[in-house]
Amino acid sequence: MKLRAAAAAVALTLLVGAAAASRGAAARANDGTVRITIHYSKFEPADLAVEPGETVRFVIVNTDPIDHEFILGDEEVQRVHEEGTEAHHAPRPGEVSVAAGKTVVTTFTFPETSGELMFGCHLPGHYDFGMRGVVSIG
């Protein structure tokens, strides 16, 4: 019985350590696909890393009971959407509406230069609540 408890404690320690270590690292596109889950009005993961010029297929899964959007772009793109959100987005690269409980796919080709782009939800109050993330290019 003590052996089983010790093994469980070791496994739990390793699991917690691995989770803590992964929090600081940006998720990378595997085979050109990134899955982003919307959960409790947050993007998971919220930090991504891609290569310059890489084309990424985003699979966005909304597990929330309310609608959200995924807007990928620079500060200007984010500002425009924050000031005048469209109710719904026709599928455009990097800009989609995601209904409650639904999954959508969008494809985006990143610039050839290093830098950062942001993604967020600009439905009223969502971005300020922290519903945003960063893509590091390069």
Image: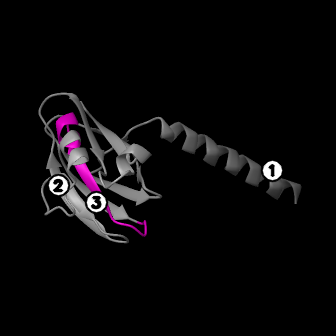
Where 9 sits versus 135, above or below?
below
Residue at the disc numbered 1: 6
Give the spatial CA distance, label 1 vs label 3. 39 Å
View extreme (right): residue:
2
> Distance of mark 1 from mark 2, alpha carbons?
47 Å
N-term-proximal mark, 2 vs 3: 3
Relative depth, front residue between 8 and 28: 28
The span shown in magenta is: 63-78
Question: Residue 75: x and y, percent?
Answer: 22, 35
Determine the residue positioned at 88% across, 55% down: 2
Against 27, is 102 above or below?
A: below
Task: Please name the residue shown 88% across and 60% down the image.
Answer: 1
Residue 48 visible in image: no
Label 2 SS: strand
Which residue matches tag 3? 59
Residue 24 to residue 121: above or below? above
